[in-house]
Image: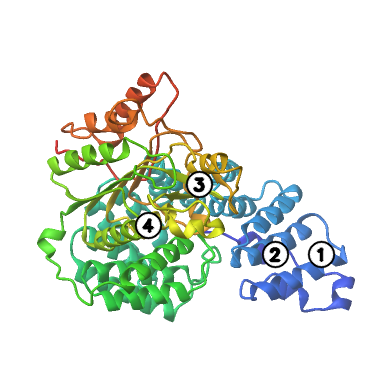
Amino acid sequence: MRRLISIFAFVAAVALASPALAQSNAQLGPLCTSEGTPADQQISACNKILALKVFSGEKLATIYFWRAVAYNKKGDYKNVIADTTEALKLTPKSIELLNMRGSAYYDSGESDIAIADFTDALAIGPPSGTIYHNRANAYRNKGDYPKALADYSKAIDLGTRSSYTYQNRGLVKQTMGDLDGAMADINEAIRVDPSLPGPHTARAVLWRAKGNIDKAIADCTEAVTLAKAKQPVNIMTPPGSVLIDAYTQRGLSYEANGQFDLAKDDYNSTLQGVAVDNVSKANQATAKVRLSLLSDAPATVPVKKAEAAGRRVALVIGNGAYRNFPALPNPPNDARAVAKSLRDLGYEVTEGIDLTQDKMQKMTREFMRGAAQAKTLVLYYAGHGVQVSGRNYLVPVDVKPDAGAAIVDSMTDMDKILAGLDDQVRTNVLIFDACRNDPFSQTASTNGGRSLDIKTRSGLAQPVAPSAGSTLGAGTLIAFATAPGQVALDGEGANSPFSAALTRHIGTPGLEVQQMLTRVRAEVVAGTHNKQVPWSNSSLLGEVYLAAK
């Protein structure tokens, strides 16, 4: 997902000449305005020039621009935005500044603002393939794949023979289900510049999606070699990110092939890199969890590739018999009903009822470990769930409310599950009917007002962003029984309102999963008289059917 930037107007246009600068340090100008200057040294030089207060207008804008370039090398997008904004006050019609600020907003997860900057740059003209490419990145980040595809194609039509543009258009085609079209574009990206590691990693993902693990490993190995031999020359590419990506994808490929020792080596290499962008942080979060899962795995696990290619697996847990909180009568019933529905659909189901901390951890870890060799995965949990400092935890039946701050270690961290399952080759459908009332506040109320060392909240939080190092979430749908921060109802019958509706619709033949959840949502809203509104977040790569058409 590389960003492109044109800096020609700032490379040659402004000579930073002044008596004050000459008397102070004649080298400050070249150090500040050189792409090859190390980031901290470049920032220091630009700071010293700004402190002289001898420049104004376009020359001052140039200093802000180059300091923004240095901040970008460090992944400090907040300061990139601040400096480009100051420069734009001085030169508001600068395409280069709008492009750089838009790219920084994009890297900060602010895709709408990035699109606005890129659109303003395009309005200034003339048409720029670079700007179309970068706006396409932002559209892709929003999930608006048709607009992303159109902008990448426009960039190519304008003569942008960038390997990154072909690569990114291929990734969009992959997302839209056109694997052959994606392969053609990524092959072209490699032909345009065979020295770049990114397209090789992208092609490895396609090979794995097509079931050719050996070619996936070969492409990742080539990407690692290239990344070590040549640091990115594009100043908008954080150093080391492509190497982290290549190691992560090769680790996932080795896992899918049952070569666990090699996978562990690659995950360790991923964690040794310096992550400054969202992709690298998410890859490291995935590598950390996968490495932990493999640490207690058997030395070898037989892999039946023909069977693994289309495996559909599910983990279903229902916790209700809490030992230190009031029991929840419905979660075991809900879990059994969902497990039966998934078995009827042909899923390999692992089922757990009223799990203690040890059993829940063991079952979850074994399931996540085996996910590397599955094509479609469903995880369903019913029971207590809480949020602590914005992170979500699933509560085993034997959790002790007097454990203080250590209580988070006795629960199952949902964000670690999301990171460990993050893999764009596999489809993940994660369903949590875990938004019931906060059991810890109830316990404190009934035990003389005793409080925890940590603050829990009812309901679950919206999953954290990749910039926090959680997950890219490609190919994943997360469904909650109610909106973030809200409480779901346990129900008066044998099942909760959400799970009852889910089991009625999950087996409908030919019903796409998001349409299925829309029907569930409508039924729950009507049945609870608007007291509960199920919520979902999807980054699925194409249409997904839990029940065959």
**Residue receiving disc 2:** 67
Q: Secondary structure at mark 3?
A: strand
Q: Are marks 3 and 4 in contact (CB under 8 Å)?
A: no
**Residue receiving disc 4:** 357
Mark 1 or mark 3, which is nearer the start of the sequence? 1
Asked if one can make out residue 51 in the rendered structure from this viewpoint, the answer is: yes
**Residue receiving disc 3:** 387
Question: Residue 113: x and y, percent?
Answer: 58, 43
Mark 4 or mark 3, which is nearer the start of the sequence? 4
- Choose mark 3 or mark 1, whichever is in front: 3
* CA distance for labels 1 and 2: 10 Å
Mark 3 or mark 2, which is nearer the start of the sequence? 2
Q: Secondary structure at mark 4?
A: helix
Q: Secondary structure at mark 2?
A: helix
Residue 50's mark? 1
- Choose mark 2 or mark 3, whichever is in front: 3
Q: Are marks 1 and 2 in contact (CB under 8 Å)?
A: yes
Q: Amino acid at mark 4?
A: Gln
Q: Secondary structure at mark 1?
A: helix
In the picture, measured across the screen, residue 487 lies left or right of residue 63, that is left
Can you say whether 296 is above or below 502 in the image? below
Q: Nearer the viewer, residue 334 or 158?
A: 334
Q: Are marks 1 and 4 in contact (CB under 8 Å)?
A: no
Asked if one can make out residue 2 in the rendered structure from this viewpoint, the answer is: no
